[in-house]
Amino acid sequence: MNDTAEASQPPEAPRPRGGDLVRRHHLATRLWHWINVIAVTIMLMSGLMIFNAHPRLYWGQYGANPRQAPDPAWLDLSHINGGVPFPGWITIPSHYSLADARLWHLAFAWILAVAFALYLLWALIGGHARRDIAPTRGELAPAHLLHDIKEHARLRFPTGAAALQYNVLQKLAYGAVLFVLLPGVILTGMTMSPGLNAALPWLLDLFGGRQSARSIHFLCAAGLVAFFVAHIIMVVLAGPINEVRSMLTGWYRLPREREDQA
């Protein structure tokens, strides 16, 4: 009887190996990824045009307001390129227009905010954030972190089934984007809106004033740029065709194990 029962049980699915084509990314992740790419790129480029209109950053409430005691600028790029630090090829629009830049920036800010809220709800309720992004205690151990840093420095990326899981450096980077940088740019952007100040006055207290919010907005945006640059470099080094295909279709070719490559 035991033999019959055991024979009737379905065999376990074989563990994927290097070279197998497997499902890697959910549809929600793929949609969020490309909406994020488009919205953040346009917001960064239009934001640089907005920054060109006043290329200084302050801490506090008033900044350069001559009617109040002005706060000293902690960053002043007004001496670069005749007071226009970012050239037209990297801004939206390419010609100087503060009004047009604000229109582009605000339009895609709402797209980003709505898409981010929906994705974050899906990630939290569905368990994606807990299961795939939150690092374990063991992964945060100094020895494990140092090992992963050394492996990345040597360009030794996970192979086989291990490539289906985010490593601890990816988890920390994605967690910083999802729970620090993107909420930071969205909330500080809301803080800089006079209309929202009337509806949500606590935002001004939270960030210490509109000028402080503008500085934090700039720093969070700079953090996103740093993440995107590192992300693109890693995609190129890991195999851009395979990586981009997985984010378009969901299908990913597992890198072969190192012993198979020998």
Image (cartoon, rainbow, N blue to C red):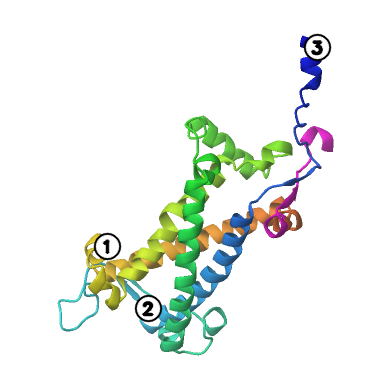
Q: Is residue 241 above or below residue 83?
A: above
Residue shown at 53% from the left, 75% from the top: 42
Per the image, label 3 sits on a secondary structure element best described as helix
Q: Which mark is residue 207?
A: 1
The answer to whether residue 249 is magenta is: yes
Q: Position of residue 237 (x, y in %)?
A: 70, 53
Determine whether the residue tagged by mark 2 lies in a helix, strand or loop.
loop
Question: Would you say residue 216 sits in the magenta stretch?
Answer: no
In the rendered structure, which segment of residues is drawn in magenta?
A: 246-262
**Residue 209 located left or right of residue 237:** left
Horizontal and vertical percent position of residue 36: 55, 64
Residue 73 appears anywhere in the view:
no
Residue at the farthest front position: 1
Considering only vertical position in the picture, is 174 above or below 89? above
**Mark 1 and 3 residues: CB-CB less than 8 Å, in contact?**
no
Q: Is residue 206 left or right of residue 2?
A: left
SS for callout 1: helix
- Spatial separation of the CA atoms under disc 2 and disc 1: 20 Å
Q: Is residue 17 visible?
A: yes
Quarter of the image where the C terminus is located: top right
**Three-letter code, disc 2:** Pro
Q: Which residue is found at the position 28% from the left and 67% from the top?
A: 212
- Disc 2 vs disc 3: Cβ atoms closer than 8 Å? no
Q: CA distance from mark 1 to mark 3?
A: 68 Å
> Pointer 2: what residue?
55
Q: Nearer the viewer, residue 242 or 75?
A: 242
